[in-house]
Image (cartoon, grey):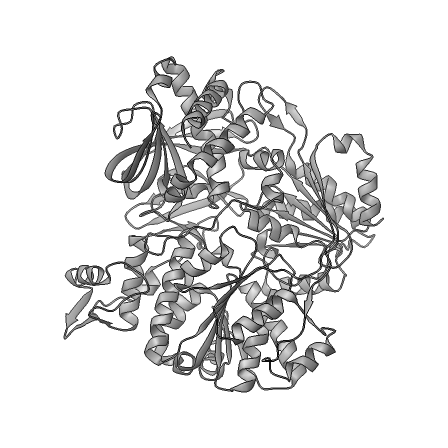
Amino acid sequence: MNVDQLTQVLRQDPLFMENVTRWEVIPAREAVYADFPETLDARLKPVLEGRGIHRLYSHQAHAVREVLSGRDVVVVTPTASGKTMCYNLPVLSAILKDNDTRALYLFPTKALSADQVSELYELIEAMGVDVKTYTYDGDTPAAARRAIRQAGHIVVTNPDMLHSGILPHHTKWVKLFENLRYIVIDEIHTYRGIFGSNLANVLRRLLRLCDFYGSRPQFILCSATVANPQELAETLTGRPVTLIDDNGAPMGQRHFVFYNPPIVNRQLGIRKGAVPEVRRLSGMLLQNGIQAITFARARVTVEILTRYLKDMVRDPLGNAGRVRGYRGGYLPTQRREIERGLRAGQIDAVVSTNALELGIDIGALDACVLCGYPGTIASAWQQAGRAGRRRGTSIVFFVASSAAIDQFIVNHPDYLLRQSPEHAILNPDNLYVLLSHFKCAAFELPFEDGEAFGSAPAPDTMLDYLAEQHILRHVDGRYHWMAEDFPASEISLRSAASENFVIIDITDAAHHRVIGEMDRFTVPMLLHENAIYMHEGRQYQVEKLDFDACKAFIREVDVGYYTDADLNVTLSLLDIEQEEDENGVGRALAEVRVLSHVSMFKKMRFDTHETLGWGKVQLPDTEMHTVAMWWTLPDELTQRLPSDALKNGMLGVANLLRIVSPLYLMCAPQDIAVQYQVKSPMTDKPTIILYDNCPGGVGLAEKGYGMNRMLLEKCLEIVTACPCEHGCPSCAGPVGEIGEDGKAMSALILRDLLDRVS
């Protein structure tokens, strides 16, 4: 059975269709071609023609022309549209014309780096030229590193290696920095929040060194679909960037099916699990010979689904190689073998975490199953784009879990299908992030008096502060590094705080191993003693938390519950940046201090979320300065509502904002926090507060301040569209939390606010 036949069968199945909230058919699109730019080196054209490429897609030709004209560009087209050509062709052309030319490629993952290098090798070997391309990361043998530094035309690495392994040792990379002409950054939609803010400062340091060595490289950036690609690229690079989004790649017809598992308890809003439904759908595709990929968020889910599908196809000898799992933790050689098997059509089904989401070449698949929402629209389309990479018909199933965000997506399919309102947000001038990179930059090269650091505000003030702390020394108009330690080794690009806690697995008494890290502001909630810590789908219990040494010791367990800490947060006002009153609704943007105290934790059963018990937590308070925005409720509304109804309604609105904000601010749910205060000490009124859940903030509250009406509208949409009677986890919250009037009061408050704000 092919995909066209399968769609006909499913459409005629009433049991299947009653759970489908939308069946969208995305029509096929013909390719739009353009001639090879005349400025491209003539040796490339016959090699491309030998591979069946006689003309470029329109966006590829456009990008190559702009790059060869000397402009910085960002290319934004869907998955499998040939973005790799947009940077490989101009880079190779420049190296062929001048053998001293150097290029630096940055990819967010090692797997993507390896995949891109293999594609480059094929082009270079076909031309028969000596263009040296190397991957430089933690797996690169020491013996090869010297050769890469001296002779590598194209150095492929990741932001973490650039930050800690290349920039601090720039004197060993003189050949690269003196001749660096191109900096290629792929998948820039992944660089948002703290990670993106750190990368922007790493690039400031990189450009500062390039300036010292006399080079001025161009940027070539690529991204999946995101609302603000040009703004994101310009914030990362600090330069004006030309946007190229005229996608010319062809695409076959694609069916996009939104599937919501049936409700098993309507009063509590509990649905059938997503994993059994995904197993059924993936098994159906496998049995019908349709090559498919299934994406799951947790590694343990990947293993469960892989085992189930293998059991379906196991031969009498026990072989089931037609089905493979793919996730972090597999050896690189095994992952490459699976990728080759997919390209060659030897594997019928693969179950993966987001490890296969980014642009690794795995050939053309016919179907894709998404087990839950991956977190952002960019990720969802990246995963969906794994099916239909050729001209044939493909099908994508989005299977929602009962998580609030999944329920929003499955009941509002236009959020995924139409132009996305989400933005990638970062703040390179976050003081915590900026201070760390000033240290790194000063270690790499002394600062001159009055020297700028990208567009960072008041660099002299920052340098003087570091001099006062005896980290820098100011002599003869220069700031010199004088501390003994190596600053880059202390700074994680993935968080704002430098003193992260190390998580140590002590399950094997003879072999303790570090399995992760966590910032100190999150530790009291997730790593207090006796907490159940989830890592890669496995459960661990925290045996000991050494707060002074910044270490947590955990042991693997298998229990039927998770823990939920009771966090008491006190907000105090530091400074108001913007403030306005509109028809009685106060709105403000401010700097606040967040004092967090964890006093107890609850044990909650999986699936039903009932409380099994509780325990005490004894940890010191944590303090954080960040940015917040808030709404104050109008007096006319609050005076006519009973106190309990007002409290339940505000709690419901806060829960709804926790669903909506990550979607429209394009951030992880843990990146923002929402509080409600029946009488706020900051405003003396009932107030709903949204703030950045990281030190200094990364711009989420500012974006929310500008999108305030949209956020409120989407909250109202969710609460009014949800079929539950009095509230459930998918809208304002469960009845046991918000009371029987909480859902109605949430809607009443939101309508009143929307009637007053523009």
Give the residue drawn at x 38%, y 70%. Answer: 206
Q: Residue 179 occupies which quadrant of the picture?
A: bottom left
Count of labels shown? 0
Give the residue drawn at x 49%, y 31%. Answer: 713
Above or below for 462 versus 303: below
Q: Position of residue 300 (x, y in %)?
A: 59, 46
Q: Position of residue 706 (x, y in %)?
A: 40, 41
Q: Nearer the viewer, residue 244 or 606?
A: 244
**Residue 62 shown left or right of residue 550 in the figure:** right
Q: Nearer the viewer, residue 248 or 488?
A: 248
Q: Residue 590 occupies which quadrant of the picture?
A: top left
Quadrant location, the C terminus? top left
Above or below for 495 versus 652: below
Q: Position of residue 409 (x, y in %)?
A: 59, 37
Residue 20 in sight from this viewpoint = yes
Residue 730 in sight from this viewpoint = no
Q: Position of residue 202 (x, y in %)?
A: 38, 64
Above or below for 754 versus 26: above
Above or below for 540 versus 136: above
Give the residue drawn at x 24%, y 73%. Answer: 446
